[in-house]
Amino acid sequence: MTMRGKAAMTVAAGLSALTLAMGIGRFAYTALLPAMQASGLSNADAGVVAAANLFGYMAASWVLGRTPPAWWRRGFAACVVLSVVSTAGMAQPGFV
């Protein structure tokens, strides 16, 4: 594969990762919030959940930015799994 082909694959992987992270981490949260509030989640608690969601983005960026390139794939996979599990957990009563 040429350098141009490798660069294109890297860009495609990065765009896919961003789409996945934003789709699961942000848009799923937005859709779940009204149901969580109807189940008794207060506005203050919703703010805490939103802050934790955004903190997760920051923490993952910080950690992966300091991770050796050889570990990026594993680190990214771990972050995706954590995002999916925590988003799924928000749909469960008593998670927050």
Image: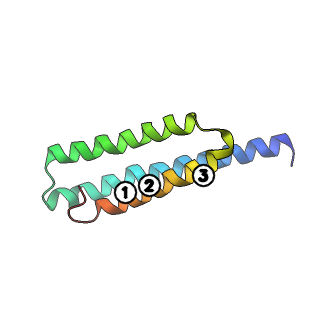
Badge number at residue 72: none
- Neighbor class of circle 3 (other Cα within 10 Å; few <14, some 14-19, many 20+) is few
- Between 22 and 71, the one lying in front of the other is 71
> Can you tell which quarter of the image residue 33 is in?
bottom left
Residue topped by disc 1: 86
- Three-letter amino acid code at disc 1? Ser
Query: What separation in Å lies between label 2 and label 3 (alpha carbons)?
Result: 12 Å
Q: Give above or below for 5 relative to 32.
A: above
Q: Which residue is mark 3?
A: 74
Locate residue 8, reporting x and y percent.
Answer: 74, 44
Residue appearing at x 57%, y 34% in the figure: 66
| Spatial CA span between label 1 and label 3 | 18 Å
Residue 87, position as x, y percentages in the image = 36, 58
Q: Secondary structure at mark 1?
A: helix
Q: Earlier in the sequence, mark 1 or mark 3?
A: 3
Asked whether the beta carbons under mark 2 and mark 3 sit within 8 Å of each other, the answer is no
Dot placed on the residue nearer the N-terminal end, 2 or 3? 3
Q: Name the residue rendered at 21%, 58% in the picture.
A: 36
Q: Secondary structure at mark 2?
A: helix
Q: Is residue 62 above or below residue 26?
A: above
Q: Which mark is residue 82?
A: 2
Residue type pointed to by label 2 = Leu
Q: Are marks 2 and 1 in contact (CB under 8 Å)?
A: yes
Nearest the camera: 38 or 83?
83
Gap in Å between the C-alphas at discs 2 and 1?
6 Å
SS class, disc 3: helix
- The kind of residue tagged 3 is Arg
Q: Where is residue 84 shown, x and y percent of the image?
A: 43, 59
Query: Of discs 1 and 3, which sits in the foreground?
Result: 3
Q: Badges 1 and 3: C-beta atoms under 8 Å apart? A: no
